[in-house]
Image (cartoon, rainbow, N blue to C red):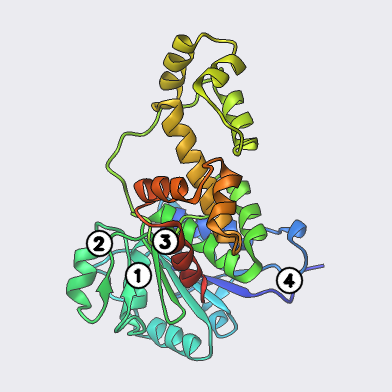
Amino acid sequence: MPNRTGPMVAALLYDGLCTFEFGVVAEIFGLSRPELGPGWYRFASCAIEDGPLRAHGGFSITADCGLEMIEQADIIVVPGWRGVDHPVPAHLCEGLRAAHARGARLASLCSGAFVLAATGLLSGGTATTHWRYADTLRQRHPDITVDDASLYRVHDRVYTAAGSAAGIDLLIEIVRQDFGPAAANSVARRLVMPAHRTGGQAQFLERPVAAREGLEIAPLQDRIRANIATRWSVGRMAKETRMSTRTFLRRFSEATGQTPGDWLAAERVSEAKRLLCQGQADMESIAMAVGFGSAHTLRHHFRSRIGLSPGDFRARFMSEAQP
């Protein structure tokens, strides 16, 4: 039986549609997820103009309905925009303002921020967009503080995400707000991606991408992740892989681009982030659970890798979680 109770998500379609961005919205909100129980999202694609509508990739699309659907929507997503120099239709701005006034949440991915900016609903607030478009958005809308570093931002129920992949982070965060961490984790697993990156995380990092994990090293990494609180010395890791210490160090570096110690510290910080987001466990308990041994060591590694203390990270996470 079709779901008729969950939040209604309307994704806008337009000529020149950004295909990937729309696909992200449809993947997260439009798939049936019976494992998450009744009341999951309802989903509709809404054309903002008469067809035919073309999408990037050389194909035409047909929407489920017209713009009138946003009158019923709880969440309205703008999946990119056809170009920063293309004006936003007045009737679309009026419809979005009316939807927001009755309580709907609005979200944009990448260049879709220009649509939400045109409504005036971001005035006096902070928004983000892809770093390539940040200066243009800043110049055209000086009443908006443009954050060109963060993955996503929220201002008065209006959400903006940076690039395409950051849009996935934002939409999973909305799932977390609506259905909790377990549901967000489930969606992220199906997408094979991290369950949570904070909106304040940098859009890009100037560092080399680590090499692919090697077949000999990957099983060890799985065992370590499953027993992260255990003391893992280099000698023990080498023994687990039936290698000499010298061979193990060389193979691990070839497989990951990191030393075993650096990789292990990063995994422990990642698990600490998950625990910090889950509840109010004290720092000593979290430090023991992830294998750091003390809150002092946890804080040291957290600051060096995240740029925040664990307490500040938790406070920021809880602040961003508020709709």
**Crowd rating for badge 3 (residues with CA inside 10 Å; few <14, some 14–19, many 20+):** many
N-term-proximal mark, 2 vs 1: 1
Marks 3 & 1, CB-CB < 8 Å contact: no
N-term-proximal mark, 3 vs 1: 3
**Crowd rating for badge 1 (residues with CA inside 10 Å; few <14, some 14–19, many 20+):** many
* Secondary element at image label 2: loop
Task: Quote the CA–CA distance across marks 2 and 1.
Answer: 10 Å
Query: Residue 133 shows which numbered tag?
Result: 2
Q: Position of residue 80 (x, y in %)?
A: 39, 63
* Figure quadrant of residue 63: bottom right
N-term-proximal mark, 3 vs 4: 3
Quadrant of the frame with the N terminus:
bottom right
N-term-proximal mark, 1 vs 4: 4
Query: Residue 113 shows which numbered tag?
Result: 1
Task: Quote the CA–CA distance across marks 3 and 1.
Answer: 14 Å
N-term-proximal mark, 2 vs 3: 3
